[in-house]
Image: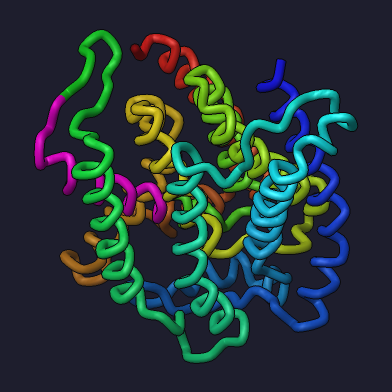
Amino acid sequence: MWNITFLLLYLVLAFVLAFAITPFYIKMLHKFHLGKQIREEWLVGKAIEFAKLHAFKTWTPTMWWGMILGVVWILVILSIVFLYFGTEIQGIIWSKIKYSLWNRNETYLSLFTLFTVWLLWLVDDYMNVKWIGRTKWISAKFKMLWLILFWALWAYWFYFKLWHTSFNLPFFGNLNLGLFYIPIFIFIIISMANAVNITDWLDWLAWWLLLFNYVVYAIITYNQNLFILSALCMIIVWTLIAFLWFNIKPAKFYMWDVWALALGANLWIIAMMTNTLIVLIIISWIYILEILSSLIQVTSKKLRKGKKVFRIAPFHHHLEAIGWKEESVVMRFWLIWMILSSVGLLVSFLLK
């Protein structure tokens, strides 16, 4: 009974906070002119065709990640206050307060991941919306180096402190990798973070996909008795719902790089904590398609003297370029994602 009450308490609080704060946050973004810049420069050469497709989105407010992070940390602080004044609050909610969202066993890793990725991209996003420099103020190479160093630290922590050395596969049990666990950990988390990020360029696309992902992991963590981590997943879900509610097309604001990367990386951390790598792979096939299409495009342009495989990469922009409407791409990706999420959730019940 307490577990259900705990989850419901933070679902209600996340709902109220996200929907109450969002209108004021939108006004603040407009006031400080934190708007989206559509640039022609890209990692390899020009992205002129992309700029033409999305030029109308220029100056749309961005930095929605501040809203999500704000709701998460407000609720973390409130949960600590609730725990401290547990006796007084018990009479209001008819249930004893046992834990806060600030929990070493369940949420430290997740919250630390969200915060540290946010710090780096806070500077990058601000410089981007203010158009300081012709391209991203922080270079892609520097950001990649930062991510590799940071995730190497996390891989070390999981391997040497938490004794994670294997991945759980249905029907085969645990696949023990020994020290190979560390490079595989680093490779997948960087790929996951960047794959989510490059999916974030069509209205509603990445947000719906992330929403499905976090609902799946809210259920998985709850089934594994990680009730506090499950509550954190649902808080993120409700902030994403608030985003979608206030962002009916045309988009009134964007998340931008920082939070797409942070949420993608956080999914990997939760997958490792629950030992459900296979589930993450199943529910991430669209992300995988997106990042593979970008890698193929970049490789082709470098090795074939500028020749491209796709009109635009990643793949969802290629579909736009050949005539698909933005809404058609997004809704068909949603349908595929619903199927993948259902399959991933079913597979999670096979893991022991």
The residue lying furthest to the front in this view is 87
Residue 304: which quarter of the image? bottom left
Per the picture, the main secondary structure of the magenta-coloured stretch is helix
Q: Nearer the viewer, residue 3 or 299?
A: 3
Q: Quadrant of residue 113?
A: bottom left
The spot of residue 280 in percent (x, y) is 40, 32
Q: Is residue 93 above or below residue 134?
A: above
Left or right of 346 on screen, residue 222: right
**Is 287 rendered above or below residue 164?**
below
Regarding residue 25, the answer to whether it shows in the image is yes
In-front residue for pair 171/352: 352
Horizontal side of 272 relative to 74 (left or right) equals left
Across and down, in percent, residue 224 comes to 48, 20
Camera-side residue of 232 and 145: 232
Q: Is 188 one of the magenta-colored residues? A: yes
| Number of marks | 0
Question: Residue 111's x, y, as percent?
Answer: 51, 51
Asked whether residue 324 appears in the rendered view, the answer is no
The quadrant of the picture occupied by the N terminus is top right
Residue under the image location 26 percent in, 8 percent down: 171
The residue that appears at 33% across and 30% down in the rendered structure is 277
Identify the residue shown where x is 41% and y is 80%: 138
Q: Nearer the viewer, residue 216 or 155?
A: 155
Residue ID at (31%, 69%): 146
Q: Looking at the image, is 129 positioned above or below residue 215?
A: below
**Type of colouring:** rainbow
Q: Position of residue 209 (x, y in %)?
A: 57, 39
Q: Which residues are magenta?
A: 176-195
Residue 279 in magenta stretch: no
Locate the C terminus and report the quarter of the image it occupies: top left
The residue lying furthest to the left in this view is 179
